[in-house]
Amino acid sequence: MDNKIPQTMPIQSATFSNPINAEIRRAAATGIYDIRGGGAKRRVPHFDDLLFLGASVSRYPLEGYRERCDTSVTLGTRFAKKPIKLDIPITIAGMSFGALSGPAKEALGRGASAAGTSTTTGDGGMTPEERGHSNKLVYQYLPSRYGMNPNDLRKADAIEIVVGQGAKPGGGGMLLGQKISDRVADMRTLPKGIDQRSACRHPDWTGPDDLEIKILELREITNWEVPIYVKVGGTRPYFDTALAVKAGADVVVLDGMQGGTAATQDVFIEHVGMPTLACIRPAVQALQDLGVHREVQLVVSGGIRTGADVAKAMALGADAVAIGTAALIALGDNDPKWEAEYQKLGTTTGAYDDWHEGKDPAGITTQDPDLMARLDPVEAGRRLRNYLKVMTLEAQTIARACGHNHLHNLEPEDLCALTLEAAAMAKIPMAGTDWYPGKPGTGY
Amino acid sequence: MQTYDLEANGLRGLNSALHAQSETTNQTEWNIVNPKGSHAIAVGLNAPIEVTVNGSTGYYCAGMNQQATVNVKGSVGPGVAENMMSGTVVVEGDASQYAGATGHGGLLVIKGNASSRCGISMKGIDIVVHGNIGHMSAFMAQAGNLVVCGDAGDALGDSLYEARLFVRGSVKSLGADCIEKEMRPEHIEILKDLLERAGADAKPEEFKRYGSARQLYNFDVDNAQSY
């Protein structure tokens, strides 16, 4: 007879989980918060929680591959003399030279140009490689103004005034010393090797009234030719969109918390901002309330991965989307072929996010010449082009199935929600019902 | 000399005309009348012309200037000569906030006083203020020289990088990582040249120099309160 007394099983705390405890120990050992790249990794309501309904008796579909489904979009039609005409509604989000290597920026330009879309500079200015390989280049106007100059401003196809980004709305930039090479330091007028801080507010304007005057100045400098975008992090999308419109923006770029960053505190990435899904409808509502939906275009970013995501964002009212993290993965970021090297860095494929350390095995988020040489910008550009084409085909497939001959004709009525959270955030009825939480007239 | 009535003919016409001037233009002198506090006057210039604004301006006068000389016979609103690359901007009166913000080059002279955040994030511009400057001036200033013939307000040079700050009068307080530094002969030479070019009646020896202690250049938990 076994007299052993049954033992209580060891139970891990849901509150003090192993990852949490590891972070406590890391903080205690180093005295500094965790800094990483990428966007929010936590599970939040997302496009996966929505489904398309597809055509049936009440609507008829378009013939796949036979009947046309257009994908073009024109950005900047409100005031700019030269709006940007894109073949596809998927753009490349702003990522800096400095955060990314020169070849990586070149690859983004090549891939975007081959797919008929635009790419975007970042904090640190415009490089000749990037301008040279990008048919349509959006020049970011950031609080730091690193590398900002009127010559490059006049070379841009559009200007994007960055008020915030989804990974860190309310936060400034950061580029740690390992990546401040001679070239990066020179472009930013900084000493080599320092941990570069960027301000969180613009140095010469505060608030929407000032922004209106700043937009006027930029338009005057560029002779009212190029579109001016205003990019905001997803926090108060209704009011931020309305104020951007009031200030005179041609395009509002709205970045949810899944949107990536080159380097920011993990606590910022995971705990500040709203899911992309929750941002779109309030922004569209603001545009509709002001009577400028489609006149002022809305570009949505933060966690766009597939053509289904593109189609869902557009069905909710966006005119286009932007991708950052997904574009880097298409170039080769976090590729399993570097697994042995990820292991040496204490991480694994798919989880590598120490982009700020400059040790990227894929040669993308680095300024190390040996690592940079691993990325062939021509081949990487081709991969990005392929990926953009696939996303576009996927979005077209869905649009045709819903009976639309242009991606812009996708509408909220094409969608249903799988979860209450998604239904509430996207104002889309739960599948099989005509109800979502907060629906006017329902009482709850 | 070309005379442009801003009130009668509008801002767009003015900046278009000024942008149309090339390196070899014969129309080198421009006289703007009736500015009446308008914003974005003479922005984005890129030719060796001389523009005189007869009156006070609003925001961003001479923003992103290259090559041109802009004289303002009055006071200026926020952000005068912001992000200037080269050339000269002279303000006879006072300047509001952010004078010379993020400027990369050229010389900005303010004959009156400058408000807060003068020289914020400056990246190589030289700024000479005949009077006093407000709080948080030269915040995160990266390169260039800020010369103040009068007094400086609170938190001068907070989070400073490599810009040089010269103040003749008192400094209410220094910002994080900003310290007084030795005035060496090369600094006297820089000051002498700038004071002369700015028409400032002051002796270089009367100034104190301030710069970065460089303690915040790399993250250190013991400096956490200063970041």
Image (tube, coloured by chain):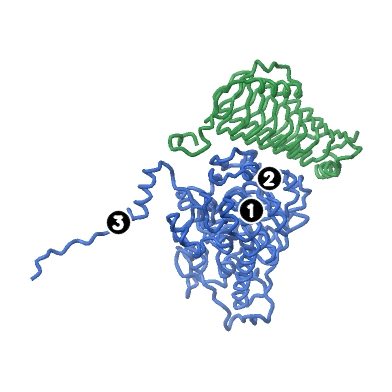
Q: Nearer the viewer, mark 2 or mark 3?
A: 3
Question: Which hue is chain B drawn in?
Answer: green
Labels 1 and 2: the sequence-earlier one? 1
Q: CA distance from mark 3 to mark 1?
A: 45 Å
Disc 1 crowd rating (10 Å Cα; few below 14, some 14-19, many 20+) is many
- Residue found at x 90% / y 36%: B2
Q: Are marks 1 and 2 in contact (CB under 8 Å)?
A: no
Labels 2 and 3: the sequence-earlier one? 3
Q: Are marks 2 and 3 on the same chain?
A: yes
- Residue found at x 52% / y 59%: A278
Question: Could one spot residue B213 in this view of the protein?
Answer: yes
Question: Element type at marker 1?
Answer: helix
Q: Residue A311: x and y, percent?
A: 59, 69
Q: Is residue A40 left or right of residue A308?
A: left
**Residue A384 got which mark?**
none
Q: Residue A237: x and y, percent?
A: 56, 54
Question: Which hue is chain A drawn in?
Answer: blue
Q: Is residue A85 left or right of residue B28?
A: left
The kind of residue tagged 3 is: Ser
Which picture quadrant has residue A206? top right
Question: Label 1 belongs to which residue?
Answer: A102
Q: Residue A326: x and y, percent?
A: 56, 62
| Quadrant assignment for the N terminus of chain A | bottom left
Disc 2 crowd rating (10 Å Cα; few below 14, some 14-19, many 20+) is some
Question: Label 3 belongs to which residue?
Answer: A13
The chain to which mark 1 is attached is A
Q: Are marks 2 and 3 in contact (CB under 8 Å)?
A: no
Q: Nearer the viewer, residue A438 or A57?
A: A57
Q: Nearer the viewer, residue A254 or A439?
A: A254
